[in-house]
Amino acid sequence: MEKAQLKLNGKTYDFPVVVGTENEHAIDISRLRRDTGYITLDEGFHNTGCESSVTFIDGEKGILRYRGYDVAELAEKSSFVETAFLLVYGRLPTVTERKQFSVLLTENSLLHEDMNHYFTGLPPHAHPMAILSTMVSSFAIFYPTYFVDDKDPKTFDTMVAILLSKVRTIAAFSYKKSIGEPFVYPRHDLRFCGNFLNMMFASPVKPYEADSEAEALLNMLLILHADHEQNCSTSTVRLVGSSRVNLYSSVCAGINALWGPLHGGANQSVIEMLESIHASELTIKDVLDRAKSKSHPFRLFGFGHRVYKNFDPRAVIIKKACLKFLESRKTSDPLLDIALELEEAALKDEYFIERKLYPNVDFYSGIIYRALGIPTNMFTVLFAMGRVPGWIAQWKEMHDAVPIKIGRPRQVYMGAPLRFYKPIEEREE
């Protein structure tokens, strides 16, 4: 086995080198503190990792795969329900398994009627992500049978269905609450995405006609957001789950992490930025100049990624789908025009080229959501809907490890040394 050596204070220490199936290399330093008395400093955990078989990313080549399947192929050929099964259970379902999984999702799509009363006390301006977090946390109250990690496969299957199906219902209900319309309950005769669109847009005075093109587009978007390796929210799910807390609470923590503008909230920030550019009639040159200025408060959202130093493969797929969808509807969006001009100009600009700043998944996804009629404050909720199967898969993988180790980072204390208490009358003003 290949080893890495560390020379410290006249001693040499060996640490195993771990090689992944895609030839990624890592140094196992789990015994570092025990053997040397030292720890590593890694702010933001940029160089800290874990072993996982769920998702593979090659940021330099712009590759993203779920369980070995290229995300572009899944987006073209699969459905969100099938992709969710793949992520959670590690394989594509058979015909029988997919049918059983779909039935389980349908059976668990309704919210407990008492949960519906929660919405009554919420103010209409409540952000849908706050509502989603609150409601998912309450699953542990309303579904106590599935609260304890008892290793029963049927229990886990039901937990999976509850999260996947009810998160969709909560998302639609939170939108209805915000516009003062009555809830539209899920239907057994509609597919996953069609059901969500119907709950969003149907009303007692205006039935919603299922649009196969819109349904397919939403399927694609959810697939592209289904997992993305050890990002902030996924790492949060794993860290919280490492205490052996229930799956619902772990996913709730992931939802809150995703809400941040540096994570899932970025798609909302992109649209608000494009709207601001459109309203102020800034030129593309003005925008890029402001983005490159260290002193200007303007920030260009939707470019660059912590992992990808090439095109984000999801952004490439979404851009193409966005252009095709708007063309098929014989409509246009001035924000799309601005986005296309920004991308073209940025990819020719030395500042962006040197820093390998390419459009990421958030740059075009909001424009598609707009085309589907999804309001801006629901963008991150849609992201969360898509990410649920990835969170579940990562939580399960971490829980299946033996033994489970609770996450507990160390620190190097940089504060004041030992001090002694002085009575208040003796303290200097």
Image (cartoon, grey):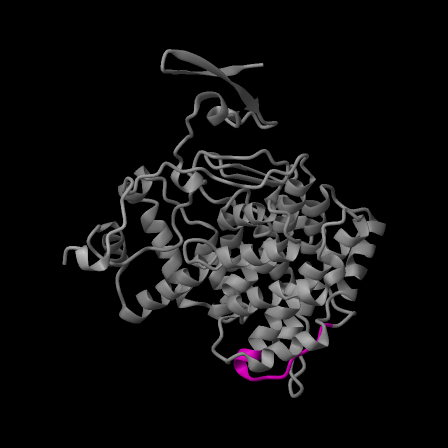
Q: Is residue 27 visible?
A: no
Examine the rendered structure and indicate whether residue 42 appears above or below residue 116: above
Left or right: residue 19 versus residue 294 is right
**Placement of the N terminus among the 4 image quadrants:** top right
Q: Is residue 355 visible?
A: yes
Left or right: residue 213 versus residue 330 is right
The residue lying furthest to the left in this view is 429
Examine the rendered structure and indicate whether residue 185 appears above or below residue 38: below
Q: Nearest the camera: 38 or 341?
A: 38
Residue 343 appears at what percent x and percent y?
37, 51
Q: Quadrant of residue 353?
A: top left
Q: Quadrant of residue 341?
A: bottom left
Q: Nearest the camera: 234 or 417?
A: 417
The number of discs equals 0
Q: Which residues are magenta?
A: 177-186
Left or right: residue 96 versus residue 218 is right
Left or right: residue 211 versus residue 19 is right
Q: Nearest the camera: 403 or 16?
A: 403
Q: Residue at x 27, y 46 (%)?
A: 420
The residue lying furthest to the right in this view is 96
Examine the rendered structure and indicate whether residue 55 appears above or below residue 280: above
Q: Residue at x 29, y 40 (%)?
A: 418
Q: Residue at x 73, y 71 (%)?
A: 110
- Residue 178 belongs to magenta span: yes
Q: Residue at x 38, y 66 (%)?
A: 272
Q: Main secondary structure of the magenta part?
A: loop
**Placement of the C terminus among the 4 image quadrants:** bottom left
Residue 207 appears at what percent x and percent y?
67, 82
Residue 40 appears at what percent x and percent y?
41, 30
Examine the rendered structure and indicate whether residue 399 appears above or below residue 40: below
- Residue 129 belongs to magenta span: no
